[in-house]
Image (cartoon, rainbow, N blue to C red):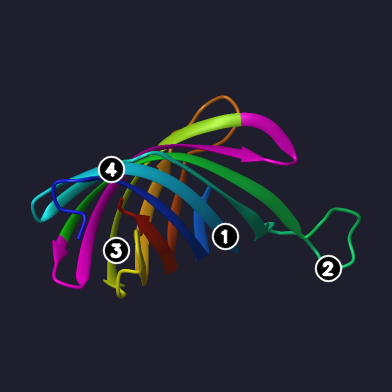
Amino acid sequence: TDRHRVTLSLETSGLLLIRYSASTWAYGASPSIRLMPGYGFGKVSVLTGAEFSGGPMLRPGAASGSADSQFVINYFPVVPVVIRYNDVNWHYDLELGALGLFQADQPAWSFGFRAGLGVGLMGLRTRYFIPWAGVAAFYEHYFHDSNRAAAEFIRGGFRIGVIYDP
């Protein structure tokens, strides 16, 4: 377990993206990777660190065969805070985070917040490593600023990770 210990979590995921902004919908996919040190307080662990994800989304209104690309590449740096409840081999996550949005065709930052839930099943410990796999879903809101209209994202998908627990 990671109870009463300092741990280091390395996690990766593949997420489906749904975006709503300026009365239009867009869809895409995004792999992510994150590194989070944490501490276990009995059955509850608190982790925080850095996450980076990015990927293509269909550009709303882009016509096939036009000179403009049908895709826009989004980059999402995140500072997540995860509260993880451990129950034997299962863990349940509540996540909040501050995040940014940078698009390849519009080099300006937008900022927002994330709220999410996750559940995972841990495998057998091998030396100092505890592997796990699960699912996660997030709601993200980006604030209106001079660069972009406000945007809502729903992200969800599979997540795998390994906890380093010396």
The crowd level at tag 3 (other Cα within 10 Å; few <14, some 14-19, many 20+) is many
Q: Is residue 38 visible?
A: yes
Q: CA distance from mark 2 to mark 4?
A: 47 Å
Residue type pointed to by label 1: Pro
Residue type pointed to by label 2: Ser
Q: Are marks 1 and 3 in contact (CB under 8 Å)?
A: no
Q: Is residue 73 above or below residue 127?
A: above
Q: CA distance from mark 3 to mark 4?
A: 17 Å
Residue type pointed to by label 3: Gly
Q: Which mark is residue 129?
A: none
The crowd level at tag 1 (other Cα within 10 Å; few <14, some 14-19, many 20+) is some
Mark earlier in primary sequence (1, 3): 1
Dot 1 corresponds to which residue?
A: 31
Dot 4 corresponds to which residue?
A: 38
Single out the mark in the foreground, 3 or 2. 3
Dot 3 corresponds to which residue?
A: 118
Single out the mark in the foreground, 1 or 2. 1
**Segment tinted magenta in the rendering:** 86-108
